[in-house]
Image (cartoon, coloured by chain):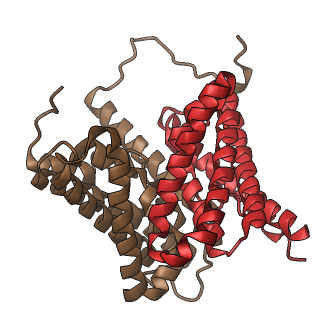
Amino acid sequence: MSPRVTTPSEDFLRGVWQENPVLVQLLGLCPALAVTNTVANSLAMGIATFFVLTGSSLLVSLLKSWIPREVRISAYILIIATFVTMADMILAAVVPEIHKALGAFIALIVVNCMILGRQEAFASKRPVGRALLDAVGTGAGFILALLMIGTVREVLGYGSFLGVPLFGETFEPWIIMILPPGGFFTLGLLLLAFAAWEERKVERVHPRHWPHGVTVTVETGGDAHG
Amino acid sequence: MGELIWIFVSAMLVNNFTLVLFLGLCPFLGVSAKVGTAVRMGGANLFVLVITSLTASFLNAWVLPHAPYLRLISFIVVIASLVQIVEMAIRKLSPTLFRELGIFLPLITTNCAILGLAIFQTNRGYGALEGLSFALGAGAGLTLALILMASIRERVELSDVPAVARNMGLVLVLAGTLSLAFMGFAGLFTT
């Protein structure tokens, strides 16, 4: 089974939007919800994950002919864990307060299924250049998704963007957006909005025509006995 | 004893792993369509969490003081290998139990709830007994969240849901509502 031939720009762009890891594939949700209560935290988590993903893809792609098939998953995890340890130490040294805010979730980048998924599905089968493009695209898509969630949550939850107040004194912050439920609600509503958008696009291409005289009745769920 | 009970209840309700700390979301969203499967997934999770806690206590006491930078790598490798061995043992000793729980074991070894438990336990400086209570509480909390979610989703399955909401969007909004309910436990111990 040979992989479908793709162009370099496809390899890059696919991860950013069309197959966005968070918004489309629903991978790596733990960090996407846990640390996105401010834009700064989202950005730090996004960049750390980007670094780990790019580094691991590069190394896995370089080493692919030396890694035995039977132990490949363990080998990928070891490589990823090494990069995460590096990211953890670098963040602790450079931006200690953000490192503290992200806490255990930096270490938990190791078990972000998106990273392992890219190694197994792409980096272990393709040349180094393509693997890097794919990692950069997917990493950028991850940062994009985290920034979207983080922006909604910080603007509504604190009334600020990157710490700069937006609405003045009279704004009553939506506390719920910075609490855990806010993470679920923000991503849920984003997904619903994207689904509605897709639906409208499909309907514009293939409009639904009911035959003349047909009325469509919609049953309510509760009283459908059967 | 009081301390141990406090850790248990705190891990199960106040800081529920799934709904408050966002750990173990993949099984929570992926395997929560049927109550029966959710119960088995919860059981398998509880089992692996207990193994993880014991492993982490052992590594923290004997190995990691000598090489702190190996923390992450050693947690992952040791936990994954141990679960693999236990899985083989269960397959030999009790095929029934293996059919019920075994198929989930490889899936959850690299789940963030498992590694999260090991890391939280280390950061909070729990000993072996406290760690065990923490693992039991976390496992019970995960199982509770899975069962609640599966019950709601079974009900939603029979309802007339708009087409746009037939995928994960609605499930996440439901999870948010559950999480909101669990926020109510936040004041449980501050009297």
Q: Is residue B142 above or below residue B159?
A: below
Q: Is residue A146 above or below residue B89?
A: below
Which colour denotes chain A?
brown
Q: Which chain is red?
A: B
Q: Nearer the viewer, residue A3 or B118?
A: B118
Asked whether residue A19 is in view, the answer is no
Residue A152 is situated, as x and y percent measured from the top left of the image, at 47, 67
Q: Is residue A52 above or below residue B43?
A: below
Residue A52 is situated, as x and y percent measured from the top left of the image, at 32, 64
Q: Nearer the viewer, residue A63 or A153?
A: A63
Query: Which quadrant is home to the C terminus of chain B?
Result: bottom right
Residue A100 is situated, as x and y percent measured from the top left of the image, at 52, 81
Residue under the point 43% across and 70% down: A151
Report the side of B22 relative to B144 (left or right): left
Where residue A83 sits, quadrant-wise, is: bottom left
Query: Which quadrant is home to the N terminus of chain B?
Result: bottom right
Number of numbered discs visible in the structure rendering? 0
Residue B110 is situated, as x and y percent measured from the top left of the image, at 49, 50
Q: Is residue B183 above or below residue B141?
A: below
Where residue B155 sits, quadrant-wise, is: top right
Asked whether residue A138 is in view, the answer is yes
Where residue B122 sits, quadrant-wise, is: bottom right
Residue under the point 62% across and 78% down: A172
